[in-house]
Image: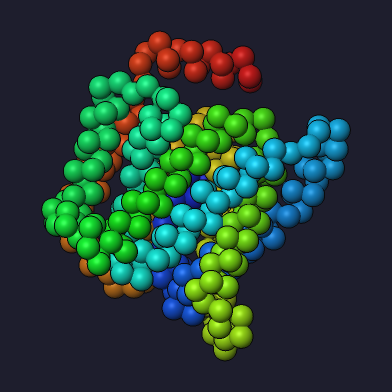
Amino acid sequence: MQLYGVLILLSLIWGLSFVFIEELIVSAGVWGTVLLRCLAGAVILLPLFILQIKKMKSAGPLPWKAISTVGIFNAGLPWGLIALSQTEITSNTAAVLNASTPILTGLMGFIFFSVLLNKKQWGGIGLGFIGILILMNFNVHELFSGHFIGIGTMIMAAACYGFSSQFSKRHLQNVNVIVLTTLSLFVGAIVGGVGVILTEPAFFSTLKNSIDPIFIVSLIGLGCLGSGIAHLLLYYLIKKGGAEFAVTVTYLVPLTALMWGHVLLGEAVSQNLVAGLVIIFLGVYLANQRPKAQRRDLNYLRRKQA
């Protein structure tokens, strides 16, 4: 029961993150939100990071290029795209689109990492895109017009997550997760800082005028909880319940985000939103289907590593 409690808690935190983004972008802007979010998450993890680095003194140099790549594509860039999206779409729509990440992970693996997909996985990818089309009310032309910011940028954010996941599996399997997460958050903060300098240079001078109770709660919730502590909860689930159990949070986050968005922001839950979510869920389920032989190989490797 403890594992299920942690799973629900994690889904509540990540679902609430979309509400916090909605609040922060008003005061901090798109890239200011990324900068503050990454810094707050990194600061929370810093004590654990320092302890881990002390244990790794004789482990050799860290793969900085690979870590920087993950920091860009798993934090800085997608979080900027999500914040940009939420200037045009509601938090619950953003959360539903974010649920397509496992589908796009498979597609990124096929395009960039020569990952072979079976028929069920291709069917899942196809279903996922049908779910996205339902959310768009089948107005595909919007993606190629001035309305690309919103749904289009959310799809790009999910694709960034998918690329980062495949890249991490290929190049960073042996890097401690606390070290990887903390350093990638610092890299994400650099990306956010560059974005602020290029697009929102007045951010640094006006920030002090934006700080109020809602701003502080949103920063703590999004940065410290959603970007810092949430990762520790995820690693706990992976360690105690296995990777398959941990990734079931993918199914819960959009549901909790719908709840938080409706209760806290008064966002409507439309029929298209629910239908799109159901279709995307079916796509995610199929996209995660592996051949039996591959599952046996994975189970053997996990037992060997235990």
Q: Which of the 4 image quadrants contains residue 36?
A: bottom right
Residue 119 in the image: state x and y as whole percent: 25, 22
Q: Which of the 4 image quadrants contains residue 112?
A: top left
Q: Is residue 286 above or below residue 179?
A: above
Q: Residue at x 13, y 53 (%)?
A: 138
Q: Residue at x 30, y 27 (%)?
A: 121
Q: Is residue 202 above or below residue 148?
A: below
Residue 106 in the image: state x and y as whole percent: 37, 33
Q: Which of the 4 image quadrants contains residue 192?
A: bottom right
Residue 153 in the image: state x and y as whole percent: 35, 57
Q: Residue at x 81, y 33 (%)?
A: 60
Q: Residue at x 17, y 54 (%)?
A: 140
On the picture, is 49 further left or further right than 135? right
Q: Is residue 33 above or below residue 138?
A: below
Residue 125 in the image: state x and y as whole percent: 27, 35
On the picture, is 47 further left or further right than 12? right
Pick out the residue farthest to the bottom.
209
Observer-nearest of 41 and 115: 115
Observer-nearest of 204 and 130: 204
Can the viewer see residue 138?
yes
Observer-nearest of 281 and 58: 58
User: What is the count of numbered marks?
Assistant: 0
Can the viewer see residue 2?
no
Q: How is the image coloured?
A: rainbow
Q: Give the position of the C terminus as an image quadrant.
A: top right
Observer-nearest of 227 and 239: 227
